[in-house]
Image (cartoon, coloured by chain):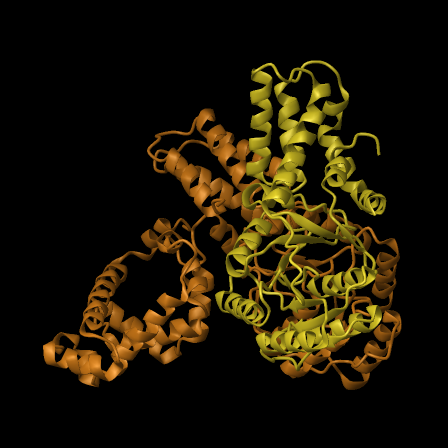
Amino acid sequence: MLESLQERLARVTKTLRGEGHLTEFHIDAALREIRTALLGADVSVDVVARFIERVRRQALGEEVLSSVTPAQMVTRIVHEELRMLLGEKTVDLDFKGYPAVVMMVGLQGSGKTTNAAKMACWIKEKKGLFPLLVPADTSRPAAREQLLILGEQAGIPTIDSRDMDDPEEIARKALREASIKGYQVLIFDTAGRLHIDDELMGQLQRLKGILKPKHILFVADAMTGQDAVRSAKAFHEQLDITGVVLTKLDGDARGGAALSVSEVVGRPIVFAGIGERLGDLEQFHPDRMAGRILGMGDVLTLVEKAQNAVDESKAKRLEAKMRKNRFDLEDLRDQLSSLKKMGPLKQVMEMMPGMDKMMPTGGVNEAQERQLRRMEACIDSMTPRERRHPQILNGSRKKRVAKGSGTSVEEINRLLRQYGQMRKLMKRLGKADPRQLKRQLGIG
Amino acid sequence: MAGAFVKKLKRGLFMTHTEFLEKVGETFQRTGPVEPQHLDRLETALIAADAGVELSMSLVDGLRDEIRKGRLTTTEELRPAVRRRLLELLQAAENAEPIDLSNEKPRVTLLVGVNGTGKTTTAAKLAKRRMDNGATVLLAAADTFRAAAVEQLQVWARRVGVPLIHQHQGADPAAVVYDALASAKSKGFDEVLVDTAGRLHTHSNLMKELEKVRKVASREVAGAPHEVLLVLDATTGSNGIEQAQRFGATVGVSGVVLTKLDGTAKGGVILAIADTLGLPVRWVGVGEDADDLLPFDDEDLVDALLEVEA
């Protein structure tokens, strides 16, 4: 199958490795690979052409430093350009207003309704504001019921517009409701449409006139191909969209659409949809996405997820232990259970630098997830003393633990071996200079 | 029917079309020897139509080969050569996966795909078509996950006048299918169309659920499911290949329904899918009305893509 963008660029930089300086020849070879990679990731043809030109100009103008390898140089330039394209920093949307109206627009099936609900949850939880959901997709059958149900699941007040067939009327009702009851944010779901449909586009414009939205968010499917540019452009020309929500990022699409849309619209991607549940929405981090594309791993997202999953005090204790190299099986168990809380192992592993290469093709399967659960069971069957001092686990203790956890002595041996390796790794990480670590990860 | 397909397609194709021409039209229209930049332009145009990098490159490489061997010399010959190659590709896929024509009753069709491609709408449209052909059809609402998916199909079922078997949201989709098949068998329905929940092919637990639906179907009716249609959004890029592959591995996809062809995207990814997986397109969705589902016609699609005069 097609290589991922990460793999392709990894290969490019590998061919550049060991070269002492950057020549036009090298740059051309690298750019050809990068072009293919970007096109393979569904970045729009025109966007790729412009991107490659910018990188070439940058690379040729760059003074060759003896301290960096050509690979690092090209990677850095590509990374910088990707970041420029994706927006330079995470945009924290401002939801102040009386109320602040957010209009969700986009093609059919891009995920407007689901993400309207997800966003309401996010605004309520992360911003502490009171949102009101407004279902106004009067064309798709049962679209309003869908948002009503999602609103109920999320505990977000939702306007019941099922007996109203005019979106403009719904808009006015929602504004009245918000001002009477004091809702701070109004999230307005619109009908999906194909951008060549003038009639529906006209309706969106009229809605914009009534709602005076603070944000018009274009919901884009991460799996979109070359058409991403055309639809984004059409919506932008008609409505002057203020931001983009990128959905279905939990799939394996390489997400070139993200680059295309950002470049064409010149507006930031503000949210990313990453799963089926209502909580599966996060702020979009352009630098992380650029890093992810370049195979640097999504360390920061991982850290953030870990922060949410790991108990603060346990994390502090772990850090102290790591520094003193006193990491024991109890800590390993905590790690395993917080790993579970962070989401499917595959997602977590993809975010770690280098892990994508260690992962078996097809990702982490359930068999491996099951194995992790068995490891946990082994540790659970040990006495506290055994967990803190694994070296006391002799033959008869192991037999007892195996019996108690429904595993085998071999499995316990394997667990201990892995624990030993982890300990060694942590020892090394504990000693590493943070700056050097960063450089190794390519983010310094 | 073919005429209607072309008309609808052309209306939508207009934008893609002009862009394709911008990139390659001049090459197609000029006379004289083929120059390297003509082929480069053709390659870019194919990529811009979502045909995929690999296919576009190999197709153009094939043309280079023909030029080297002297079988292709002038630009006038370029367009017919591309047309022939694309048609061969689509026809090979059609031959690789012939339609199951067994007379098993009820005939069971599963509609599968990622979220938001139009499975529910397609289920209703397909029911309408089958009924127009005189078959008795039963719809099964096995999308029990998405909020209000059942209600959506209910509206459609009323609209096209087809009976619907459903349970509550969150019910086991395999149980819904079991109910539908039992009902179809006892009442002698010709066809059962199963609408399933959209799922990203990367979520293995959800794919397992789909496998179970398939198992239940094959246990209840001999040879079922007779058709498994992957519903694919025409705007999908190269990820369509992964979708076809993963759904194929799980439930054995037998054909593709290309939806939303009334937008500007033309679903060039089906070329890549036909090329790598030998999977044919069966139907195309070209609008929002119940009648806007048409049988796929390979010549029309290729011609619409390559035509010089609009």
Question: On the rendered structure, is A24 left or right of B256?
Answer: left
Q: Is residue A119 visible?
A: yes
Identify the image quadrant of residue A355: bottom left
| Chain coloured orange in the rendered structure | A
| Chain coloured yellow in the rendered structure | B
Q: Position of residue B168 (x, y in %)?
A: 66, 82
Note whether A163 is above or below B217 in the view shown.
Answer: below
Q: Position of residue A286 (x, y in %)?
A: 55, 55
Question: On the rendered structure, is B134 left or right of A286?
Answer: right
Q: A390 or A359: which is nearer to us?
A: A359
Q: B153 or A86: which is nearer to us?
A: B153
Residue at screen point 63% across, 48% down: B98
Identify the image quadrant of residue A284: bottom right
Q: Is residue A100 visible?
A: no
Residue at screen point 72% across, 37% down: B302
Question: On the rendered structure, is A341 left or right of A127?
Answer: left
Residue at screen point 88% across, 57% down: A199
- Counting every numbered tag in the picture gives 0
Note whether A254 is above or below A325 in the view shown.
Answer: above
Residue at screen point 72% across, 71% down: B189
